[in-house]
């Protein structure tokens, strides 16, 4: 798999912990890599520089680990090809296993960003590695969950959370396609979709999990979760019908949940139902549903704009003026918020 660059922004800063310098020809000849690394700067840490200064030097294994870390931070690093060739010549297929061990050790001690870096390096070396993909996805998951639990809302970094969540979900999706019999990714993917409000996709992921899982307790939990998802899945399917222009089908599915405990306080149900009603000429029911949407979410501009359109069609100038003013006020508040933030 090709590693995305969405997390590079968080890992590239680690390159500042390294000094890049060219090794002497004598050292390169001794390692039998003169043809690979001549005039190529290699990554050194402070400890390496001290050891070189004291005459102790640096081992090829240490140099390879440094190179792997650099590649994990930035798989498109300028000298990544030369570093990979160095590792292949000196360690053949053994480098991958060492990097996986380093990644797992970092994860076990809670150094999750460093674990991500090593897992990424392992994926550069072996792009179809299940162990590297799953370890990387789980490290990303732990990082975005931890960031989401920050006490003060103002301290949460939404972009950080969003990027790590997107990376986790993308990797889990790849695993479920390439290794469909591995149960755990289906499980975590189901909950990731659920937290995003993607109920149909969550239900499908949980269904796939049940098809391959062996843990009885987890299977019981997921079956209960799917039962709880029955109404949200149907509602989402109804909304999808409406979004795709199948207004009668969507309205029929959604109106079954009007007033139900499952969705009575969920404003999108009433917004989409009102949207559909207006498109099939049921103005009165459309207006009623849209007003219910606004009762639950008083600043929802789309509901207001639908009501404005309905009243314009009916020639109700009083309500046209009323909702025009409301839309203008809400947009003004939102513009002010964007300006201040």
Image (cartoon, grey):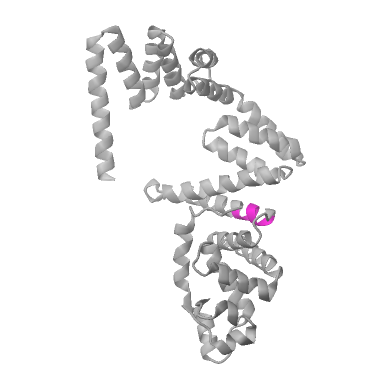
Quarter occupied by residue 221: top right
Location of the C terminus by quadrant is top left
**Numbered disc total:** 0
Relative height, residue 334 to residue 72 (above, below): above
Relative height, residue 73 to residue 151 (above, below): below
Q: Position of residue 207 (x, y in %)?
A: 68, 33
Rendered residue at 54%/25% (across/down): 236
Rendered residue at 42%/15% (across/down): 274
What's the magenta region? 131-136
Relative height, residue 41 to residue 137 (above, below): below
Quarter occupied by residue 333: top left
- In the rendered structure, does residue 4 fall within the stretch colored magenta? no
Front-most of 149 and 129? 129
Q: Is residue 94 left or right of residue 69?
A: right
Q: Is residue 123 left or right of residue 248?
A: right
Farthest residue, direction front? 35
Front-most of 170 and 184? 170
Rendered residue at 53%/87% (across/down): 24
Q: Position of residue 143 (x, y in %)?
A: 53, 53
Magenta-highlighted stretch: main secondary structure? helix
Q: Position of residue 187 (x, y in %)?
A: 65, 41
Rendered residue at 63%/87% (across/down): 30
Residue 298 can be seen, yes or no: no
Q: Position of residue 87 (x, y in %)?
A: 64, 72
Quarter occupied by residue 210: top right
Residue 54 can be seen, yes or no: yes
């Amino acid at each position: 798999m090709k590693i995305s660059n969405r997390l590079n922004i968080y890992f590239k800063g680690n390159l500042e912990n390294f000094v890049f310098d060219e090794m002497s020809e004598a050292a390169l000849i001794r390692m039998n890599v003169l043809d690979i690394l001549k005039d190529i700067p290699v990554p050194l840490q402070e400890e390496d520089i001290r050891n070189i200064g004291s005459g102790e030097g640096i081992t090829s294994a240490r140099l390879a680990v440094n190179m792997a870390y650099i590649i994990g931070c930035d798989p498109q690093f300028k000298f990544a090809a030369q570093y990979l060739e160095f590792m292949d010549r000196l360690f053949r297929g053994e480098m991958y296993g060492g990097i996986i061990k380093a990644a797992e050790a970092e994860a076990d001690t809670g150094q999750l960003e460093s674990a991500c870096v090593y897992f990424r390096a392992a994926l550069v070396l072996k792009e179809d590695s299940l162990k590297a993909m799953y370890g990387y996805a789980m490290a990303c998951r732990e990082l975005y969950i931890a960031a989401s639990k920050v006490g003060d809302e103002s301290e949460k970094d939404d972009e950080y959370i969003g990027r790590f969540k997107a990376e986790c979900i993308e990797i889990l999706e790849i695993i479920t396609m390439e290794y469909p019999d591995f149960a755990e990714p289906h499980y975590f993917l189901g909950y990731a979709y659920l937290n995003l409000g993607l109920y149909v996709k969550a239900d499908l992921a949980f269904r796939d999990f049940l098809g391959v899982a062996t843990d009885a307790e987890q299977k019981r939990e997921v079956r209960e979760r799917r039962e709880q998802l029955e109404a949200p899945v149907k509602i989402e399917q109804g909304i999808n019908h409406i979004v795709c222009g199948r207004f009668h089908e969507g309205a029929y599915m959604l109106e079954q949940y009007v007033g139900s405990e499952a969705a009575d306080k969920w404003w999108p149900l009433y917004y989409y139902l009102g949207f559909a009603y207006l498109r099939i000429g049921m103005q009165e029911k459309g207006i009623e549903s849209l007003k219910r949407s606004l009762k639950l979410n008083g600043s929802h501009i789309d509901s207001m704009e639908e009501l404005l359109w309905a009243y314009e069609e009916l020639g109700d100038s009083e309500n046209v003026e009323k909702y025009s003013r409301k839309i203008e006020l809400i947009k003004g508040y939102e513009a002010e918020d964007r300006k201040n933030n």
